Structure formats: structure tokens, C-alpha cells
Image: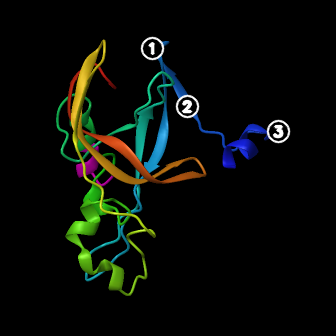
Amino acid sequence: STWGKWQNAKSPSAVIATRFIKDTQYMGYIQVGGGVPGYDHHPAADPVRIRVVFDTGSTNCWVSGIKCTTGACDGLQKRNRSGHASLYDPERSVTSNPTWRLSHPQWNNSEHNISLLEDEETLYEPYPVHIKFGTGEISGTTQRDTIHFGPVEVTGQVFGMIEKEKGDVAE
């Protein structure tokens, strides 16, 4: 199994640069989504690189989504408008499930030869999520997409896409 190989490794599989914040958080970058190749006069979009808190005490993965305008998202929206993608937008990821797949059903037959659904993969059904922390709260919906941690790729990862943030959650 993969776990057995990883546990027996003599050196790390990847080194991910992190920043220690306020003596409580490790922050670093992950890459979310598959991006979009240019097509039908639409420009290409790269996968988005997002700064996250690596919370070793949590089982959840959260990323700030394009609909988020509150809390730290306000600054990220300004950065997005300046041409530096900082918020996850499932419409700009060919690997997002179900967003891209539902809005582009013809893509499987396109010249780009990108298979949207893996063998036996079905359309993911997002659900609302909300969580309170000691310093604030976040809410949004779940999404399924590809995430990269350094050179490590995780396909079909379900995560919370933040649409509303209150308090000092990730500022």
C-alpha cells in the first residue's frame, strides 16, 4: 500500500515552506484546481495558489472561495481583481466536480482530450458547511477538486469552500 511505502521512507516526500504566525499557526501555500486551458477565445487560467493554515488539529481542508467577500477575503478579492488569483473559483478548474462538469458537459468530447470523470466517478453533491473557532467562524459549501501540496497531488479531494468569514480566522 502507499501508506506502507511512505512510512518506511528514509527522507521526506516533500518539503513545503511554512510561516509561523502569532506563535499559533503554520501557514503555507497549496495549489487548488486544474486550471483551464484556453478554448473558444477564452484565455487559459492556471490553478490557483492559495495560502492556508496547516491545522494539524483539524480533519477539514478549507479554502477561500471566489464568493467570499468578508473578513480576510476582502483583501483577497482586491488581489484577485489585480490579476493575481488568490481565491478558488470552481468555474476556472477543469477538475472541479460538479461545477465545471455541469457547466461544460461537452468538454469530454472536446479537442483537449481531458476526461472529466474518472472511471466510476459520479457527480459530487455539495452540501453546506459551517464551523466556529475560538476566534471566529466560517461557512460555505463543499467542493471536490484536485489539490497539490508541493509535489504531492490529491485528486478528488473534498474540501470546504469558504463563502463567508467572521472574526480573526485567517487574517
Question: Which of the two marks, 3 or 2, is nearer to us in this view?
Answer: 3
Between the residue at mark 1 and the residue at mark 2, the CA separation in whole angstroms equals 13 Å
- Residue 74: assigned label: none
Looking at the rendered structure, the kind of residue marked 2 is Thr
Q: Is residue 154 left or right of residue 16?
A: left
Residue depicted at x 30% and y 49%: 143
Relative to the observer, which residue lies in front, 84 or 117? 117
- How many discs mark residues in the rendered view? 3
Between the residue at mark 3 and the residue at mark 1, the CA separation in whole angstroms equals 32 Å
What's drawn in magenta, residue-wise?
A: 78-84
Magenta span has 79? yes
Residue at label 3?
10
Looking at the rendered structure, the kind of residue marked 1 is Lys
Q: Is residue 53 left or right of residue 67?
A: right
Q: Is residue 12 left or right of residue 22?
A: right
Mark 3 and mark 1 lie on one chain; the one further toward the N terminus is: 3
- Residue 18: assigned label: 2
